[in-house]
Image (cartoon, grey):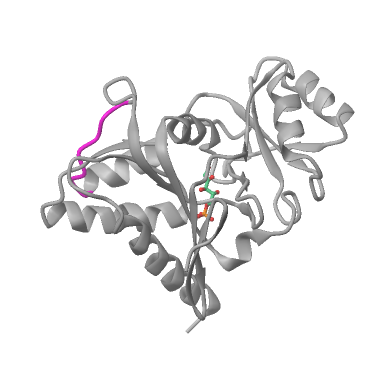
Amino acid sequence: MSTQTQIDQLKEAAARQAVALAQDGMVLGLGTGSTAAFAVAALGERVQAGLKIVGVPTSERTAQQARSLGIPLATLEEQPRLDLTIDGADEVEVESLALVKGLGGALLREKIVAAASTRLVIVVDAGKLVDRLGSRSPLPVEVVPFGWRTTQTRLQNMGLRPTLRLGTDGQAYLSDGGHYILDCATGPIADPAGLEIALATTIGVVESGLFIGMASQVIVARPEGIQTLQAGGEHP
Ligand SMILES: O=C(CO)[C@H](O)[C@H](O)COP(=O)(O)O
C-alpha cells in the first residue's frame, strides 16, 4: 500500500470520528479540502441513514459534494448560528491550536463559517502538527484583485515573501469570492495574533489564513491511532 493511501485511510478514520459528533437537529459547517471531503462523505452516509442535520458549505466544491450525497444545505443568512463545523487545516500549532488554513483556497468562507460556529473541530494527519505556525506551509492571504501588486508590496514590507497563486490554467487563481490569493512564505511566526491583526489592517487584504483561538478540538490521524487535542490540553 502506498504511503498516500495509508494517510488517506487514517484521515478518513479521523474524519469519521469528527462526524460522530453530529446529532439530530444540528446546523453543521462543512469544511473544504481533501480531509473535509472525507468528513462530508461520512456525513452523507449518516444522512442517508436518517440523521437530520442542515449543512452550511464553505465552498462551491463542498456544496456540490454535499448536494450529490443528499445533505440538506442552507446559507448563513438562513442559519446564522452553527452548532459545529468540521474542517481541515494546513498547520496546527500544538500548544495553542492556532491554525494556518487556505491552501485549498476557501479561507475566507471557512473563517466566516468558523466564526459563526459554537465549535470548530479540525481533522488533520500528524504531518500538519507544528511547534510554530509558518514552519511547513506558506500563509495564504486573500486579496482584492484591484491593485494586488501594491498589496503584495505592502506584505513584502512587513517581511513576508508573497507569491501570487496560479490556477491550473496558469492564470491567477480566483477564490469563490472572486479574490486573488498571495501565498506568503513567513518562516516560523513568533506572534501569530499580532500578524493576524497587522494583516487585517493592511489595505487590499480581504482575510488571512491565520485562525487564532478558533479551534475547540483537533482530531489527529496518526499511524498508531487517533489522538484528540483539546483547546487547553490533550483529551484522554
Ligand atoms: O483550508 C483549507 C481549504 O481552504 C483546507 O482545510 C486545508 O487546505 C487542508 O486541506 P487538506 O485536507 O486537503 O490537506
Pick the front one: 226 or 177: 226
Question: Is 71 a magenta residue?
Answer: yes
Determine the image quadrant of residue 14: bottom left
62 relative position to 188: left or right: left
Where residue 82 appears, x then y in whole percent? 34, 34
Q: Is any part of residue 59 visible from this angle?
A: no
| Span colored in magenta | 69-75
**Can residue 172 be seen in this snapshot?**
yes
Q: Main secondary structure of the magenta part?
A: loop
Q: Residue at x 54, y 78 (%)?
A: 3
Residue 46 location, x and y as percent? Answer: 19, 56
**Magenta segment includes 28:** no
Count of numbered marks? 0
Depicted 62 relative to depicted 137: above or below: above
Residue 231 rendering spot, x and y as whole percentages: 54, 51
Out of 43 and 211, give the one closest to the viewer. 211
Q: Residue furthest bottom?
A: 1
227 to 32, vertically: above or below = below
Q: On the picture, is 75 further left or further right than 169?
A: left
Q: Residue at x 72, y 50 (%)?
A: 133
Name above or below for residue 224 compared with residue 157.
Answer: below
